[in-house]
Image: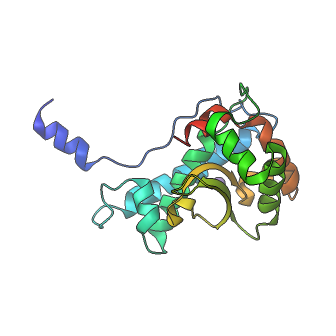
Amino acid sequence: MNTLLLSLILTTMSYEMPKLPYETNGLEPVISQQTIEFHYGKHLQTYVTNLNNLVPGTEFEGKSLEAIVASAPDGAIFNNAGQVLNHTLYFLQFSGKPKSHEPSGKLAESINKEWGSFENFKKEFAAAAVGLFGSGWVWLSADKSGKLHITKEANGSNPVRAGFKPLLGFDVWEHAYYLDYQNRRADHIAALWSIIDWDVVSKRVD
Ligand code: MN
């Protein structure tokens, strides 16, 4: 490859849409094709486009999403980077046909240590998601010592802001469920467990 082409590619390098590991109707009936088309195709695309418009010429140019979300001041770059990071982790954590409906290995052990059982963890996580006021996210994350946490994140924030590693996130913005569940956020949260790909989530621990 010639150097001019290489430098063109580098200067136009940008934040990208994650490739969905399923068809847009692959998560039905838990998440409808219409919701995926709006949530992934419109909402996430807008965050990606906004971020690519905002970052050039700033101190964040060339930085990873995680680095931006960890360090950017509150504002448009932080909000859009947070939502690109959040939704990338979110859309990649699902499968229409997960091999296992439970975590395994180190993650399973850590969940049992922190919450006693997987069932109890799900109860605590769902309660946080149902109880979050307004728009935001609930995350399972690991701190530097490996201890797990359930956190409520307002708007587009993410546990990387606190130095934690995000493992599993539920989006409780209304755009995530309103077409399918209207005001029934608790029903949406309860249904999500059946499409979590625990192989993907368990691998994020390492
Ligand atoms: Mn969303």
User: Dividing the image into four equal quarters, which quarter contains ligand 1?
Assistant: bottom right
Residue at 57%, 60% (x, y): give it.
Answer: 159
Asked if residue 46 shows in the view, the reply is no
The percent position of residue 124, horizontal first and vertical second, equals 81, 56
Q: How is the image coloured?
A: rainbow
Q: Nearer the viewer, residue 10 or 107?
A: 107
Q: Position of residue 108 (x, y in %)?
A: 69, 39
Which quadrant of the view contains residue 95? Answer: top right
Q: Is residue 175 above or below residue 13?
A: below
On the image, the x and y values in percent for residue 131 come to 81, 66
Residue projecting furthest to the left: 3
Residue at point 30% right, 59% down?
61
Q: Is residue 47 left or right of residue 132?
A: left
Q: Residue at x 11, y 37 (%)?
A: 3
Q: Is residue 109 visible?
A: yes
Question: Residue 96, percent across and down?
Answer: 72, 29
Q: Nearer the viewer, residue 206 or 48?
A: 206
Using residue 44 as the reference point, say whether residue 102 is left or right of it: right
